[in-house]
Amino acid sequence: ALQIAFNLFRGGKAAGFGPCWSPILQGLVPYTETEFTLVPLRQEDGTFKFNENELESTLRNLGNRGFFYFNNPHNPTGKSFTREEVGLINYLCEKHDVVLIPD
């Protein structure tokens, strides 16, 4: 299913949280010729967090042909995003007309 979803945006721009599951970066991204940007998850106080401004800036740069790959719980970090974080990610994708591909 992910291969089909990524292929719908062949040659386009995409982003996702990093570190990212290696089969995505080594398999799907090259296969679909996707320009993939990682939004870093940084460990703070024993948990992984993302910076809202970094995420929004990345989404803004994807344009209306881009997508955001969202893996929850996040592989390989094991982070489970909170309801508030998921809501924020969804809101920012909608705001910048970016398709959200959940996994």
Image: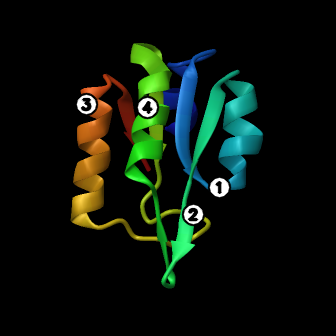
Q: Residue at x 58, y 70 (%)?
A: 77
Q: Where's residue 1, x and y in %?
A: 49, 38
Is the residue 39 above or below the residue 98 in the image? below
Is the residue 76 above or below the residue 68 in the image? below
State which tag comes first along the sequence, 4 or 3.
4
Q: Which residue is mark 4?
A: 59
Look at label 4 and name its amino acid: Leu
State which tag comes first along the sequence, 4 or 2.
4
Does dot 2 land on a helix, a strand or a loop?
A: loop
- Residue at mark 2 to residue at mark 1: CA–CA distance: 6 Å
Crowd around label 2: few <14 · some 14–19 · many ≥20 (10 Å): some
State which tag comes first along the sequence, 3 or 1.
1
Q: For the view shown, which residue lies furthest in the bottom direction?
A: 46
Q: Which residue is mark 1?
A: 21
- Residue at mark 1 to residue at mark 4: CA–CA distance: 20 Å
State which tag comes first along the sequence, 3 or 2.
2
Look at label 3 and name its amino acid: Glu
Q: For this rendering, which residue is in front, 67 or 52?
A: 52
From this viewpoint, is residue 102 visible?
yes
From this viewpoint, is residue 66 visible?
no
What mark, if any, has residue 75 been given in the picture? 2
- Residue at mark 4 to residue at mark 2: CA–CA distance: 21 Å
